[in-house]
């Protein structure tokens, strides 16, 4: 990789001002996309899906952990395989979940590997994000899971659960901080 060229302070400031105009346009466009995302219609999750966790089987509503919104991270980890390196990097870069919890949002991971394999990796790596196995369920098909890492945003109203958004592909490379995760939620910041 080559080093940037050396300039005077005035040249640097002019270039920086020009770039700042472009950065502001990107931020404004991103804010418009986030607002449009929150206006998407939602679809009811009609089945009562169950997942396997360290304490046994849990339902999808249990994963909300008493909060109204849930971000469900599809971590690629198939039975008997190694955990996805990109997914692992994504989890390592997460901040404390308390900030999301304060906004009425839970974050969990779901993989196809058995719960015992998930817990072994989670403990070895010191991760605190709850991790569940989706073995034997067709939850993947209903939420459009393609086998890549994905975040699905869900909302419940005490009686029903709704899917409000789902990422695909390289979008995950731009998500991972508190701010970008909150931008995926249907209710946003309080």
Image: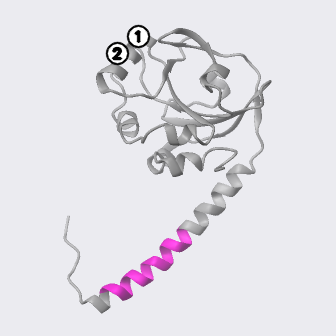
122 and 164: which is toward the camera: 122
User: Can residue 114 be seen from the camera position used here?
Assistant: no
Give, as a single range, the part of the protein colored magenta. 12-26
Q: Where is residue 131 drawn, in percent x and y?
A: 47, 22
Relative to 62, residue 43 above or below:
below
Relative to 7, residue 47 above or below:
above
Q: Identify the residue shown where x is 42% and y is 19%.
A: 78
Q: Which residue is mark 1?
A: 116
Residue at the right extreme of this rendering: 159
**How far apart are the alpha carbons under marks 1 and 2?**
6 Å
User: Can residue 123 be seen from the camera position used here?
Assistant: yes
Within 10 Å of the Cα at label 1, are there few (<14), some (14-19), or many (20+) other Cα atoms? some
138 and 157: which is toward the camera: 157
Badge 1 marks a residue whose secondary structure is helix
Q: Which residue is mark 2?
A: 120
Q: Identify the residue shown where x is 48% and y is 44%.
A: 172
Magenta stretch: residue 16 in it? yes
Magenta stretch: residue 177 in it? no
Q: Where is residue 80 drawn, in percent x and y?
A: 36, 13
């Amino acid at each position: 990789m080559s080093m940037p060229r050396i300039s005077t302070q005035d040249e640097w400031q002019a270039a920086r001002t020009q770039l700042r105009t472009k950065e502001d346009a990107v931020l404004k466009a991103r804010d418009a996309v986030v607002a449009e995302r929150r206006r998407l219609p939602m679809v009811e999750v009609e089945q009562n899906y169950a997942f396997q966790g360290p304490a046994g089987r849990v339902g999808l509503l249990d994963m909300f952990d008493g909060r109204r919104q849930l971000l469900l991270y599809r971590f690629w980890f198939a039975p008997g395989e190694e955990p996805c390196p990109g997914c692992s990097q994504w989890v390592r870069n997460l901040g404390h979940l308390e900030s999301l919890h304060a906004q009425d949002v839970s974050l969990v991971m779901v993989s196809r590997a058995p719960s015992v394999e998930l817990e072994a990796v989670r403990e070895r790596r010191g991760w605190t994000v709850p991790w569940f196995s989706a073995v034997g369920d067709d939850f993947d098909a209903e939420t459009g899971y393609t086998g890549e890492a994905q975040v699905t945003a869900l909302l419940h109203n005490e009686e029903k659960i709704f899917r409000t958004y789902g990422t695909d592909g390289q979008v995950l490379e731009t998500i991972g901080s508190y701010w970008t995760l909150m931008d995926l939620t249907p209710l946003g910041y309080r």
